[in-house]
Image (tube, grey):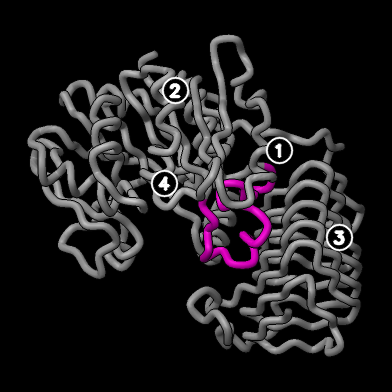
Amino acid sequence: METLTLILAGGKGSRLDILSERRSKPAMPFAGKFRIIDFALSNCTQSNLYDIGILTQYLPLSLNEHIGGGKAWDLDRRDSSVTLLQPHNYWYLGTADAVLKNLEFIQRRTPKYVLILSGDHIYKMDYRKMIAFHKENNASLTIATQPVDPSEVKRFGIMSIDETDEIIKFEEKPKTSDSNLASMGIYLFDYELLERVLLNIKRDDLDFGKHIIPYLIETTKHEVYAYQFKDYWMDVGTYDSYWETNLQMTKDFTALDLYDPTWKVFTKSEDLPPVKVGSDAKIETSLVSNGSVIEGTVINSVISPGVRVGKGSVVKDSIILNNVIIGNNVTIQKSIIDKRVVIGRDSYIGYGDDFTANIEKPDLLSSGITVIEKRTIIPEETTIGRNCRVFKSHVFENKKIKSGETLR
């Protein structure tokens, strides 16, 4: 085998807060019918990489059920495989520790190269081009990179390169940096080098960004290179980025084309009937998924499979996940409604001009987004303001909820 692919898919996505209470970040729904991990998996099969290990950890059930035997991505063939790798005795303590604890899985396959991916980013990429770049430069490690806004450098591994694309400096999540060239969390290793550094660096919390990459840059010459990826790539690790990236997909022209027949994004789909649009319904600039029944108005929103929007209701600038039931005469603005929520008639969600930040989590919710947890039941005639967090355990004794509140 030339290339073995490992997808790191065990992250909680703590900044997604309520949305990651019951699923890992790679299992998060995206753009109606997809899940975030679909992009990495589809990139693999479109790049003719058919031997894949998926390293899961946090709440793996929904991810395991989604991937199954890999049929949706053509990974159930005789000459391909997808293997779900979960911790045996102890949790993975770092990204490289996760790979180290599955070293036997890698050794059995004796690959020449190991491609390591993050399972929680939105992008389309032909990995064959990165592999060709790696070979041309006689690299031992190649890192996919992309410039980020200078205000965002604290969220990424940041590197400096010379005129040959060799990485000469690397900092993991610096407060400030002269460079804004960020690691995409995509690493292509020569297998022999990967095995050697995993076994030689003795740390329980072994991490690629904190330990492996800085060590290799300090101890090698002409071996670690940056592959500069020019196309769309997004980390949807916050409420704001998740909301913005989903709604970008509704526009007439998007940087990421979900409808490109030459590079499809595959997913496991439910067998659902077509969308039903009522006689008084109105839909503008939105994604509406199969199985949905729309009798009200949907504007600039993403509607996932099996959603019902009642008569006289208005959904605007919102993400509605699977099987949500919205009663009649409900208004929803700039909200993320998780799966199987029921919203009673004559209610207002994300309501008003008060943009008070969430009192408990002001760093997560300050732009006006209200989030409702999976399986919550909202009674009829309830008003919920902006920047609110609503957990399903809450009992609605008061139906007038001010902006910035958290309901448990």
User: Which class describes the residues within 10 Å of circle 4: few (<14), some (14-19), or many (20+)?
Assistant: some
- In the rendered image, residue 369, in percent from the top left (x then y), is placed at 61, 73
Q: Earlier in the sequence, mark 3 or mark 2?
A: 2
Q: Which disc number belongs to residue 233?
A: 4
Please name which of the two marks, 1 or 4, marks the residue nearer to the observer.
1
Q: Amino acid at mark 1?
A: Glu
Could you tell me how far apart the alpha carbons at marks 4 and 3 are, in whole angstroms?
Answer: 32 Å
| Residue that carries the numbered disc 1 in the rendered image | 65
13 and 252: which one is in front?
13
Q: Quadrant of residue 104?
A: top left
Q: Estimate the spatial distance between the alpha carbons at disc 3 and disc 2, rounded to whole Å.
A: 39 Å
3D distance between C-alphas at marks 3 and 1 = 24 Å
Camera-near label (4 vs 2) is 2
**Can you say whether 259 is above or below 147 in the image?**
above
- In the rendered structure, which disc, 4 or 2, sits on the residue that comes first in sequence? 2
Q: Are marks 1 and 4 in contact (CB under 8 Å)?
A: no
- The residue carrying mark 3 is 325
Question: From the viewer's perspective, is residue 58 above or below residue 34?
Answer: below
| Residue under numbered circle 2 | 47
Q: Residues within 10 Å of mark 3 (few under 14, many from 20)?
A: many
Q: Which residues are magenta?
A: 11-33
Residue shown at 65% from the left, 34% from the top: 67
Q: Secondary structure at mark 1?
A: helix
Q: Is residue 404 left or right of residue 123?
A: right
Q: Residue at x 13, y 39 (%)?
A: 166
> In terms of depth relative to the viewer, which is nearer, 288 or 111?
111
Q: Residue at x 29, y 44 (%)?
A: 145
Secondary element type, mark 3: strand
